């Protein structure tokens, strides 16, 4: 699988994750989200920024949905539940947000 983006082919795994994380850009994230039927809002970007910071600044840590709920509750100043995250990223917040954010596929099991 690959994305045709700005005249170039961006290679991905069979699951749609970038094979080269340095190929990621905010514009590419918008493109991937569009392919997945998502119009990115500031809340989408908050989740993706959190995931990228955890991955690149914290030893390639990839938070699960529960950790994302806690972090976004703190950031947004309100209790965030799973339902709200699944409204943002219906195919699984930790996985779909990570894919759009240009991160590699998580190998951990479970999601909550």
Image (spheres, rainbow, N blue to C red):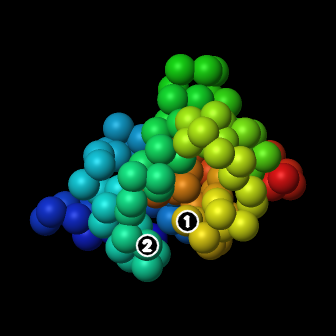
Instruction: Judge by depth and name the residue closer to the eye, 33 or 18.
Output: 33
> Mark 2: which secondary structure?
loop
Instruction: Judge by depth and name the residue closer to the eye, 44 or 12.
Output: 44
Q: Using the image, determine if residue 39 lies above or below residue 85.
A: below
- Judge from the rendering whether residue 39 lies leftward or rightward of residue 77; answer left or right: left
Q: Using the image, determine if residue 7 lies above or below residue 97.
A: below
Instruction: Judge by depth and name the residue closer to the eye, 27 or 2.
Output: 27
Whole-percent x and y of residue 16?
Answer: 51, 65
Q: Which residue is mark 1?
A: 88
Whole-percent x and y of residue 56?
Answer: 51, 26
Q: Using the image, determine if residue 38 lies above or below residue 21.
A: below
Q: Circles 1 and 2: CB distance less than 8 Å? A: yes
Residue 86 visible somewhere in the drawing? yes
Q: CA distance from mark 1 to mark 2?
A: 8 Å
> Mark 1: which secondary structure?
helix
Q: Using the image, determine if residue 62 lies above or below residue 79.
A: above
Please give the name of the residue rendered at 43% of the width and 72% of the height, measured from the top-left corner.
Answer: 38
Residue 106 visible somewhere in the drawing? no
Q: Which residue is mark 2?
A: 38
Please give the name of the residue rendered at 58% of the width and 66% of the height, measured from the top-left corner.
Answer: 89
Q: Nearer the viewer, mark 1 or mark 2?
A: 1
Mark 2: give few (<14), some (14-19) or many (20+) Cα within 10 Å: some
């Amino acid at each position: 699988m690959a994305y045709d983006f700005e005249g170039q082919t961006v290679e991905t795994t069979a699951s749609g994750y970038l094979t080269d994380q340095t190929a990621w850009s905010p514009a590419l994230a918008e493109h991937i989200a569009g392919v997945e039927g998502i119009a990115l809002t500031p809340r989408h970007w908050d989740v993706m920024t959190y995931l990228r910071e955890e991955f690149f600044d914290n030893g390639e840590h990839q938070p699960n949905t529960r950790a994302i709920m806690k972090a976004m509750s703190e950031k947004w100043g309100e209790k965030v539940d799973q339902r709200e995250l699944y409204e943002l990223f219906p195919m699984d917040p930790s996985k779909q947000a990570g894919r759009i954010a240009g991160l590699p596929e998580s190998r951990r099991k479970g999601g909550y």
